[in-house]
Image (tube, rainbow, N blue to C red):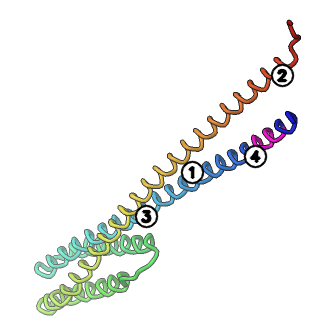
């Protein structure tokens, strides 16, 4: 009878040990998954912030080009043309890089930017042939579309920064969860090891008692 009870006890302990190991493994696996999720969200936030930064750079360069173009129309100083072209090229490059980082151009920004550059070239051409009034009129006609493009880009920057903030928050949550799961797994593993030690020590003591010679 005692042998049967011992066998049942051993079987129960073995089942409990297997379940415990499975739980520990599952907790560690979940912790790793949450850690990967955190890194993914960190990368996502970085991408959104980089997109926003590139778009802001494009706006800055475009604004400088527009201001210099206006100065050129008024003064006719040919020395200003290289700066206009340089600033325009930098704006296009930054805009293209920002859209590439975003992965899509839902706002049709590249086409609008291309149209603005073409219109800008037209203003320069008119001023170069001495048509001051025509250049001024063309520049004035360009202003509304340029302002509309800038407003759309501003809204895009705001949305990208909001997306970055949301991704950062998700990364923080995932990091907290990963830490909690790792601590839980480590704690459970420690408890299991301690329980195993207690069981082994108890078993050795019982065997020692049973094998000891009687003093009576």
Seen at 27% across and 79% down, the residue is: 152
Distance CA(mark 3)–CA(mark 1): 24 Å
Residue at 20% from the left image edge and 90% from the top image edge: 126
Q: Is residue 103 left or right of residue 132?
A: right
Q: CA distance from mark 1 to mark 2?
A: 41 Å
- What's the distance in space between the residues labelled 4 and 1, CA to CA? 24 Å
Query: Could you give the CA–CA distance between mark 3 and mark 2, rounded to whole angstroms?
Result: 65 Å
Q: Earlier in the sequence, mark 3 or mark 4?
A: 4
Please tell me the numbered disc located at residue 31.
Answer: 1
Residue furthest to the front: 216
Question: Left or right of 178: which side holds 200?
Answer: right
- Dot 1 surroundings within 10 Å: few (below 14), some, or many (20 or more)? many
Relative placement, left or right, of 13 versus 101 is right
10 Å neighbourhood of mark 2: few (<14), some, or many (≥20)?
few
Which residue corresponds to mark 2? 207
Give the percent coordinates (x, y) of residue 137. Answer: 14, 91
Q: Closer to the camera: disc 3 or disc 4?
A: 4
Report the residue marked by disc 3: 47
* Magenta-highlighted residues: 7-14
Between circles 3 and 2, the one closer to the viewer is 2
- Gap between marks 2 and 4 measured at Cα: 23 Å
Secondary structure mostly seen in the magenta stretch:
helix
The residue carrying pointer 3 sits among few (fewer than 14), some (14 to 19) or many (20 or more) residues within 10 Å by Cα, namely some
Please tell me which residue is depicted at 15% across the width and 79% down the height of the picture.
70
Question: Which SS class for mark 2?
Answer: helix
Residue identified by numbered label 4: 15
Quarter of the figure that contains the C terminus = top right
Cα–Cα gap, marks 3 and 4:
48 Å
| Mark in the foreground, 4 or 1 | 4
State the residue at coordinates (70%, 48%): 19
Is residue 174 depicted above or below 144 in this figure? above
């Amino acid at each position: 009878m005692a042998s049967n009870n011992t066998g049942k006890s051993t079987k129960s302990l073995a089942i409990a040990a297997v379940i415990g190991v499975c739980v520990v493994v599952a907790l560690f696996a979940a912790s790793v998954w949450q850690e990967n999720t955190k890194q993914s969200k960190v990368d996502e936030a970085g991408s959104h912030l980089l997109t926003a930064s590139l778009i802001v750079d494009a706006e800055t360069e475009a604004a400088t080009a527009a201001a210099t173009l206006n100065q050129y129309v008024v003064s006719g100083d040919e020395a200003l043309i290289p700066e206009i072209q340089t600033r325009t090229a930098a704006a296009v490059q930054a805009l293209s890089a920002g859209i590439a980082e975003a992965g899509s151009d839902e706002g049709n920004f590249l086409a609008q930017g291309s149209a603005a550059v073409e219109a800008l070239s037209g203003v320069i051409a008119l001023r170069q042939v001495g048509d001051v009034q025509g250049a001024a009129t063309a520049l004035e006609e360009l202003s509304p579309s340029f302002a509309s493009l800038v407003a759309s880009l501003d809204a895009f920057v705001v949305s990208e920064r909001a997306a970055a903030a949301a991704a950062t928050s998700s990364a923080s949550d995932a990091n907290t969860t990963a830490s909690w799961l790792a601590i839980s797994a480590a704690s459970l593993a420690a408890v299991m090891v301690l329980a195993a030690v207690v069981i082994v020590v108890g078993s050795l003591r019982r065997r020692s008692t049973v094998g000891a010679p009687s003093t009576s």
